[in-house]
Image (cartoon, helix red, strand yellow):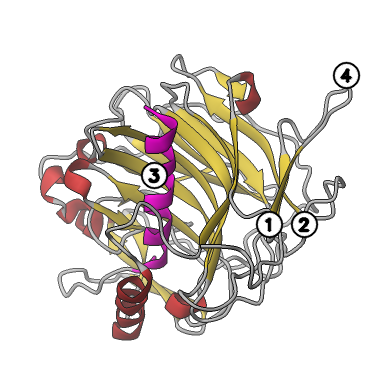
Amino acid sequence: MSTEIMMALVMNLLPLLLTAVLVRSDQNMVPLKSFKIYENVTYVCIDIYKQPGLDHPLLQNHTIQMKSSVSKPELNNQFGKNKTYKNKMECPDGTVPILRSSKEYISNAQLFAKKYFHPLSGDSPGTHIAGVRSSNGPYRGVGAWFDGFPLNIERDQASYTQVYIGSGLNNQVNFIQTGYMTNPGVFGDGRLWTYGFWKGKDGKGCYNTACPGFVQVSRDVPIGKPADPEVPDWTRCSIHQDKGTGNWWLTQRISNEAYIDIGYWPKELFDLIGNGANMVGVGGAVQAARSGPSPPMGNGKFPNGDHKGSSLISNIEVLDSNYVQRKMNSFPIEQLLDSPKCYGLKMGKIPPLHVSKLGFFFNYGGPGGNSCGI
């Protein structure tokens, strides 16, 4: 896959992140319990076999996989004190948490997408990225630690951090990504939200459980959730393909919590990543209005050589074709930075013979502004 196709793949999918991370209401889903974790943020516990993800026509005969077969090595906590999820949910056995949607959420998401997504262009006006990727697959997964910060994001802007995998062939794309997003135009506030997105066969795709496709398995942590403001937003997100089933799992770890298999995108949704993905990547991205300044990225500061001074993505690792976990820089990597006036990217430097707890890492981000380009 050529560099031009890969760049078009990434840039084409970035603006889609601005549509929604919402869940549809369904009269056939009968909640057994609910959790109101913040104002206007409520989750309902739905029978795992009646969740909306299974309504996808490609999943009519799908058997739910309850646990990933890929082991997740424990890492020493490096990013803050031993704290736990403040708003951790515990749905009853046999149920999973699904975000309760509203007409306002759905209306805002549709308006945002219609106003800012230009389907005829190879990229989206006002979209900027800073990160790294490798296209020497096949890869079976990718994961990284990253932080989150409160930012002053306007209602017509968005800023997010992403971990992604994908493959492209003859203008067709399979793509999965996860991370943090701040999007007041959709959520009505400036909080960080976790999200997951997929695009598969026939160009179909979706966010979280907003439409059928993603299978929620964890009864404690949903795929899309506001970040807890009292817990350090150091999170490890990973996407990996199951050895036995070929399903693509979403796993999270926050602070000293154990790894949690949140759920997965079934293999039936895809036609280009059945034997791994050609490309993996991590980084930050922003979306501005068609007219107006670009928003801040990361923590709003340029990288200055001190890994504590700006946003950090660390311990970036991939699963190779044999499911061996390796540092991402053990493969050829490409640095992505399209607006150096507004954002920066500085690769981590580790002295010879020194083993860093940060592994392979880089700093990224910046204040944005009025001169970031198109």
**Mark in the foreground, 1 or 4:** 1
Q: Quadrant of the N terminus?
A: top left
x and y, in percent, of residue 336 in the image: 58, 42
Residue 7, label in figure: none
Q: Report the front residue among 320 and 242.
A: 320
User: Residue 372: x and y, percent?
Assistant: 61, 64
Looking at the image, which residue is at 21% across and 33% down? Answer: 271
Dot 1 and dot 2 residues touching (CB under 8 Å): yes
Q: How far apart in space, not on screen, are marks 3 and 4 (Cα)?
A: 37 Å
Going from N to C along the chain, the mark reached first, 4 or 2, is: 2
Separation of marks 1 and 2 at Cα, in angstroms = 6 Å
Element at label 4: loop
Label 1 Cα crowd, 10 Å radius (few <14 / some 14-19 / many 20+): many
* Residue tagged 3: 8
Residue 155's x, y, as percent? Answer: 51, 81
Does residue 345 lie above or below 170 as drawn?
below
Say which residue label 1 marks: 343
Q: Front-most of 7 and 23? A: 7
Residue 241 shows in the view: yes
Instruction: Tell which tag, 3 or 2, sits nearer the viewer.
Output: 3
Q: CA distance from mark 1 to mark 4?
A: 29 Å
Earlier in the chain: of badge 1 and badge 2, it is: 2
The residue lying at 31 percent from left, 30 percent from top is 273
State whether residue 262 is above or below residue 36: above
Q: Are marks 3 and 4 in contact (CB under 8 Å)?
A: no
Q: Is residue 13 magenta?
A: yes
The answer to which of marks 3 and 2 sits earlier in the sequence is 3
Where does the magenta region start and end?
1-22
Per the image, the residue denoted by label 2 is: 302
Within 10 Å of disc 2 (Cα), the crowding (few <14, some 14-19, many 20+) is many
Is 138 covered by the magenta stretch?
no
